[in-house]
Image (cartoon, rainbow, N blue to C red):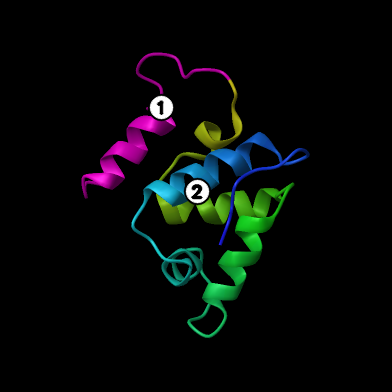
Amino acid sequence: MDMAGSDGDDPVMIRIREWFAASDWTLQTLGERMGYGADTARKSAHQFMRTKNPTIMLLRRFSEASGIPLPELVTDAKPKKGKSRPLGELVEEKKKGRG
């Protein structure tokens, strides 16, 4: 499935899709970690990943599931030193199995 961003997508969804592509998670895993039941997890995660403009509720669910702080997801500015880690660093940790 192509989850690449297109014009009109909120930048947060582009970052989320990049994170997901770098992770070893399946849509089922993402959906279950976002709180959906096993029978609807894959479909719910698929719909979330195709969202162009997510609700705050969905972003909170994703934040909790992925361990990425919500402010890190929604800000375009670089975090101040010591406040939070860059999303790219979290992706690298995820790739190495530490996330």
Quarter of the image for residue 44 reads: bottom right
Relative placement, left or right, of 7 versus 69 is right
Q: Nearer the viewer, residue 6 or 78?
A: 6
Q: Residues within 10 Å of mark 1 (few under 14, many from 20)?
A: some
Relative placement, left or right, of 16 versus 96 is right
Task: State the predominant SS element of the stretch in magenta.
Answer: loop
Q: Which residues are magenta?
A: 77-99
Q: Which residue is mark 2?
A: 63
Amino acid type at mark 1: Pro
Amino acid type at mark 2: Ser
Q: Which residue is mark 1?
A: 86
Closer to the N terminus: mark 2 or mark 1?
A: 2
Quarter of the image where the N terminus is located:
bottom right
Marks 2 and 1, how far apart at CA: 14 Å
Q: Residue furthest front?
A: 2
Q: Residue furthest top?
A: 81
